Image (tube, rainbow, N blue to C red):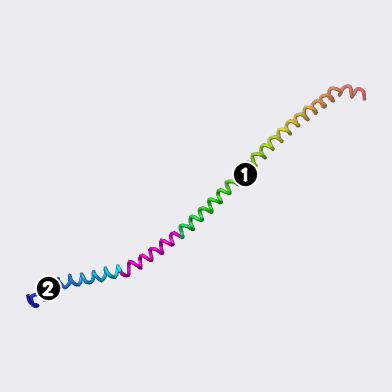
Amino acid sequence: MNFENLAPYLAGPGAAVLVLLLVGAGVYRLAVQYLIPVLQGAVNRHLEELERSNQRGEDAVNRHLSHVETMGKRYDALAKQHAEEHRAILVAVESMNTATKEHQERLERKVGGLYGRFDSLTGNA
């Protein structure tokens, strides 16, 4: 084989395949040496930021849950106090009702007594 027989292959498809292999090897080397470490650092920074953001979110949720728990305890205390006050008011109203009935009966007896003695009172006057 001489150069004249190999020249068309070196200038044609063989050269294209060789250039393709060289370019592919260069891209692979560039990706492995430079792009992957840069991307790995960027991904690590992104994951750290996500972790910090997630932690802030968890802290906020915990603060809100604590606030809800505190409000629930306050509500329970107010509901208990309200129930006690309600019972006291019912007792007071029942007592007033009993006293009112007693006064009403006493007043009816007095008025009835006056009407019963009305004729004798007017006759004496």
Q: Amino acid at mark 1?
A: Ala
Please say whether residue 97 is one of the residues in the magenta stretch. Answer: no
Q: Nearer the viewer, residue 20 or 47?
A: 47
Specify start and end residues of the magenta stretch as a single range.
33-51
> Based on the displayed image, in which of its 4 quarters is residue 47 positioned?
bottom left
The alpha-carbon separation of the residues under discs 1 and 2 comes to 94 Å
> Based on the displayed image, in which of its 4 quarters is residue 89 positioned?
top right
How crowded pointer 1 is (Cα within 10 Å; few <14, some 14-19, many 20+) is rated as few
Q: Nearer the viewer, residue 94 or 42?
A: 42
SS label for mark 2: helix
Q: Which numbered disc covers residue 77?
A: 1
Q: Is residue 78 above or below residue 101?
A: below
Classify the position of the C terminus by image quarter. Answer: top right
- Residue 117 pos. (x, y %): 86, 23
Q: Label 2 belongs to which residue?
A: 9
- Residue 67 pos. (x, y %): 56, 51
> Based on the displayed image, in which of its 4 quarters is residue 78 positioned?
top right
Q: Is residue 64 above or below residue 21?
A: above
SS label for mark 1: helix
Q: Is residue 97 above or below residue 47?
A: above
Q: Residue at x 32, y 70 (%)?
A: 34
Main SS, magenta residues = helix
- Residue 118 pos. (x, y %): 86, 24
Please say whether residue 34 is one of the residues in the magenta stretch. Answer: yes
- Residue 1 pos. (x, y %): 7, 75
Q: Amino acid at mark 2?
A: Tyr
Specify which label sits upstream in the sequence, 1 or 2.
Answer: 2
Q: Is residue 105 above or below residue 14?
A: above
